[in-house]
Image (cartoon, rainbow, N blue to C red):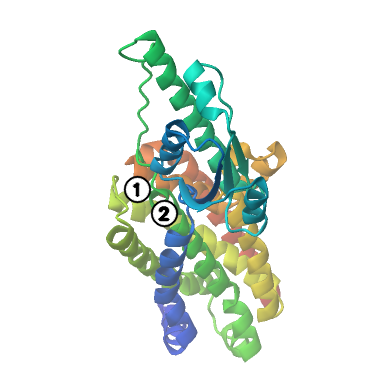
Amino acid sequence: MSRILAVMKKEILQMSRDRMTLALIFMIPLVQLLLFGYAIQTEVKHISTVVFDQSLSPESRDMLGSFSASGYFDITYSTSSYAGVTQSIDSGQAKVGIIFPPDFADNVRRGESAPLQVIVDASDNMVANQAIAIANSIGLIKSQEVLFNKMHLSGAPYDIRVRPWYNPDGITAYYMVPAILGIIVTLTMMILTAVAIVRERERGTLEQLMVTPIKSYEMMIGKIVPYIVMGYMQITVALLVGVLVFDVPIRGSLLQLYLLTLFFITASLGLGLMISNIAKNQMQAFQLSFFVMLPSILLSGFLFPRDAMPRVIYYLSAIIPLTYYLDIIRGIILKGIGYQYLMGQVTVLLVFSLIFLTISILKFKKKIA
């Protein structure tokens, strides 16, 4: 125990002298949460829209009012020709173009189908999908209003009442901020520990540890514990930012969140130590860390739903620790569920921790031998 404490003391002193490490502890959660929390929005609103209204009638103005009132379309430009619509979209001034034909109002008054054209710049897939879905919804709603008026109905024939749970207003920050917290922990825990043993080797202090009676697992524990404390400090800072800045609700138990986070932190640290034992210098350690980070961000469900991925990629994402931690943190913070619903994810993270740490200890022992 005394030898583990000695390694811990040495690692803490080394961390305290390293200004970059101290900056990573506090600045990364603040900067990344504020940057990504505001920047990443899966719901695209206020799409710049250009209008070519050849009808110039109350009916076309009413339809435009529906587009504008939705909050998704900002009527920022008006033109008097089809070429003007094309020019606005080609130049990027507008993402959507709405064109009313001259007989739009006459068709509406006669009860006939009144087509209007909605042109969408699909070079930005997320904006395009949002614009297409909302435009179709507006057309459907306006069509229903006309039919109800003609049929003299007091209400819709079918009353479908949808109740979204956990995030009824669809606020992106509620979904993204907990996930960003997992990215922050993965990034700092893995990179900092990945360079730990490599740094010792490059500075020549690893040889000093080799001649001491300390065992390899004692050295690993002594190096891991300070980073676990640092991980909890980062989580606390990130949660405070999420609650105070983005009003993210914490519906579950904070105690359970902190307890279950331990398994993710140890898995991330174990992965970092394994990289540290494989790499021959700090540059290789950084490169291997970022090689692991990119799939973690893209395949874990942080940005894209795993169910929409091809089967091969879906199963590949199952070997990423962040995949399981996102279920844990989103489940506790947004759904308010407890460990009884998350035991599968916790078990997998525990297995990852044991595998990574065992490989690190064996690899380190081999280097000593």
Eyeballing the image, is 258 above or below 199? above
Distance from Cα at disc 1 to Cα at disc 2: 8 Å
Contact flag, marks 1 and 2 (Cβ < 8 Å): yes
Q: Position of residue 212 (x, y in %)?
A: 55, 84
Residue depicted at 42% across the width and 33% down the height: 58
Q: Is residue 158 visible?
A: no
Pointer 1 local density, CA inside 10 Å: few below 14, some 14–19, many at least 20: many
Residue 227, quarter of picture: bottom left
Eyeballing the image, is 66 above or below 192? above
Residue depicted at 47% across the width and 53% down the height: 41
Which residue in the structure is indicated by mark 2? 178
* Circle count: 2
335 lies left or right of 185: left
Task: Depth check: give the residue in front, 362 or 292.
Answer: 292
361 lies left or right of 243: right
Callout 2: SS: helix
Callout 1: SS: helix
Amino acid on which the number 1 mark rests in the picture: Ile
Residue depicted at 49% across the width and 60% down the height: 266
Amino acid on which the number 2 mark rests in the picture: Pro
Quarter placement of the C terminus: bottom right
Quarter placement of the N terminus: bottom left
Q: Position of residue 100 (x, y in %)?
A: 56, 36
Pointer 2 local density, CA inside 10 Å: few below 14, some 14–19, many at least 20: many
Task: Depth check: give the residue in front, 163 or 129.
Answer: 129
Q: Which mark is residue 155?
A: none
Residue depicted at 56% across the width and 20% down the height: 113
Which residue in the structure is indicated by mark 1? 333
Task: Depth check: give the residue in front, 223 or 47.
Answer: 47
Residue 280, quarter of picture: bottom right
